[in-house]
Amino acid sequence: MGFWVQIQLPAALAGKELTLQPAIVERRYFSKDRMYATENNVYDQFLDGNWVDPKRLGELPSGPVYSLRSADFTYTSREQHRLWQVWIDSPTASPILELEVKYPRDVRQRSDGRGYMFRLALEWAANEADRVNSASSSELMEKDGIVLTHKSTQVLKLHVPHSSDH
């Protein structure tokens, strides 16, 4: 069991470093939600991601790729975005991915100093639609059940590649 994650970034971030803090959460109805941040090597799996052609946004491989990962895509100045993708094994059939993305200091920041929180409930039911916050929407908070607001996981530094003609 598992799922693909794609993160699209503007080319303006080329040469900069993002900080990602991922967690897999299992929804529990009669007790606190359980976080699989370290139990299932989520961090190590995120390290196996790679940069791909931005035209592949939304086009995911049919399943996991456990062989050697393909080489990173070589970007040119014509690409307006960078696209990073990774396969994540899941210990549960209906995982929730929580991801905090912190941009470099010289890029727009949240007023509380945290990164932007994303929460994706990976279920078949339509009522479990994606929940996100951005600079223009209301922020996801602890009252929304976000586990990362009161627990931390290991952070991952993601260097956004320059274009080859840079």
Image (cartoon, rainbow, N blue to C red):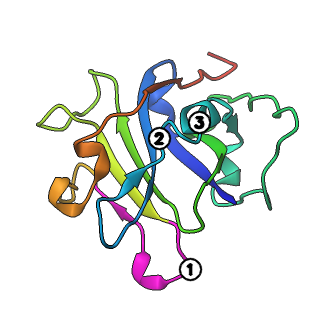
Q: Quadrant of the N terminus?
A: bottom right
As measured in the structure, the alpha-carbon distance from the residue carrying label 1 to the one carrying label 2 is: 23 Å
Residue annotated with mark 1 = 124
Observer-nearest residue: 124 or 51? 124
Q: What span is in magenta?
A: 122-133
Q: In the image, which disc is placed on residue 37?
A: 2
Kindly identify the residue that appears in the image at 53 percent across and 74 percent down. Answer: 123
Locate residue 1 relative to residue 71 in the image: left or right.
Answer: left
Mark 1: which amino acid? Trp
In this figure, which residue is indicated by the disc labeled 3?
A: 41
Name the N-terminal-most of marks 1 and 3: 3
Q: What's under tag 2, amino acid-wise? A: Ala
Label ID, residue 19: none
Looking at the image, is mark 1 or mark 2 nearer the viewer? 2
Residue 97 percent coordinates (x, y) = 46, 54
Along the viewing direction, whichever of 143 and 120 lies nearer the viewer: 143
* Helix, strand or loop under label 1: loop
Label 1 close to label 3 by CB (< 8 Å): no
Residue at screen point 60% across, 42% down: 83
